[in-house]
Amino acid sequence: MAGMMRGPLLDTVRNKTVATKLFSLSGLFAVHKPKGPTSADVLNHLQAKLLEEAGLPKPRRKTKNHILKIGHGGILDSAATGVLVVGIGKGTKMLSGMLAGSKYTTIGQLGKATDTFDSSGKVTEERPYHQITKEDLENVLQKFTGSIMQVPPIYSALKKDGQRLSTLVKRGEVVEAKPARPVIVYSLSLRKFKPPLFTLDVECGGGFYVRSLVNDIGRELSSCASVQELTRTKQGPFTLEEHALYEDKWTIDEIAQSLKHCMLLLSVEPSRKKLKTELSEEHTVSCEDK
C-alpha cells in the first residue's frame, strides 16, 4: 500500500513546488506574438500553459478573479507580430510606466486603401501609384517625423461608451473617428522601395498607430496606401531578437530566467530614455492597439 501511494504523493509534492515557483514570478518579460491571435488570446494561452505546468486548473473565461496575475503592455493587432511585453505578479503595475516607446517595421502597399487601414479589411479605394518615386516618398516621411497630430483608425481599441470602436463597427453601428491627437515619431526611415510595396522603420511614442501613418502617407502622395505587414521589433527596452520568448519557451523556468535578465535591463533603461521622454511629456499616453 505504501508503494502504491508513493507515486501520487510525489506528484502532489512536485506540483506544489512548481506552483509555488509560478506564483513567485514577478516583473516584466517579453514574448513573441504570432500573426492571427489577439494580444488577449496570447495572454490567455500563456496563462493556460503555465497553470497546466503547475498542475492547476484553468480559470473560467468570464471570471475576473484570476488566480495568476498577468497583463500586457500594449495591444498588437491580430494581424501584427512581434514583441508583446508581459507583466506578471507585481510586474503588472509596471506596464504603463515603462513602455512609452516602441519600434516597428511595416510593409505598406501603395494604390490600395482598406476600411481597417491594413490587409485584413475590405478594399475601399484604388488609385494610381506608378507616378510616385522613391524621392517623393522620402520627402513625405519628413512631414510625419517629430510631434504630429494623428487621427486614430476607427478599427481600434479606443472606446466609446465603454465599448471598443472596432466592436461597434463590426456590429454595423455608425462610428465617427476620434479627433486628431498629438503623438510623437522619434525616427521614420525608408528601408526598401519596390512599388507598390515599401518598407518603413518607425520609432514612436505611446498611442501611435502605424496603420494611420501608412494611410496618411498614401493620401499625402495623392494616392492611397494600407499596411500589408506589421512587426513590433522593440517595446520599451525589450527587443524581438534578444528578449521575446517564443511559445516553446513559455515555461516557468524559462520565464524565471527571462525575468532576471529583463529586470536588470529595466534598471538602466530610464536614464537612456530620459531625453526622449522629455521631448514630449505632454504627448505620452498608454500604449494602444497599433
Image (spheres, rainbow, N blue to C red):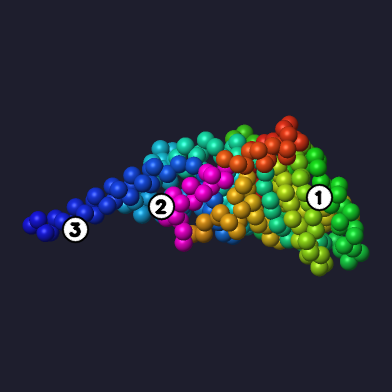
Q: Residue at x 49, y 42 (%)?
A: 27
User: First in sequence: mark 3 or mark 1?
Assistant: 3
Tell me which residue sits at (62%, 47%) in the image.
237
Q: Is residue 107 visible?
A: yes
**Circle nearer the N terminus (1, 2):** 1
Give the CA separation, mark 1 to mark 2: 43 Å
User: In this rendering, is residue 95 above or below 112?
Assistant: above
What segment is highlighted magenta in the picture?
248-266
- Residue 263, percent from left and from top: 52, 44
Q: Is residue 63 visible?
A: no
Q: Secondary structure at mark 3?
A: helix
The numbered mark at residue 216 is 1
Contact between marks 3 and 1 (CB within 8 A): the answer is: no
Q: Earlier in the sequence, mark 3 or mark 2?
A: 3
- Residue beneath label 2, please? 252
Q: Which residue is mark 3?
A: 7
Q: CA distance from mark 3 to mark 2?
A: 23 Å
| Position of the N terminus by quadrant | bottom left
Residue 191 on image: x %, y %: 78, 61
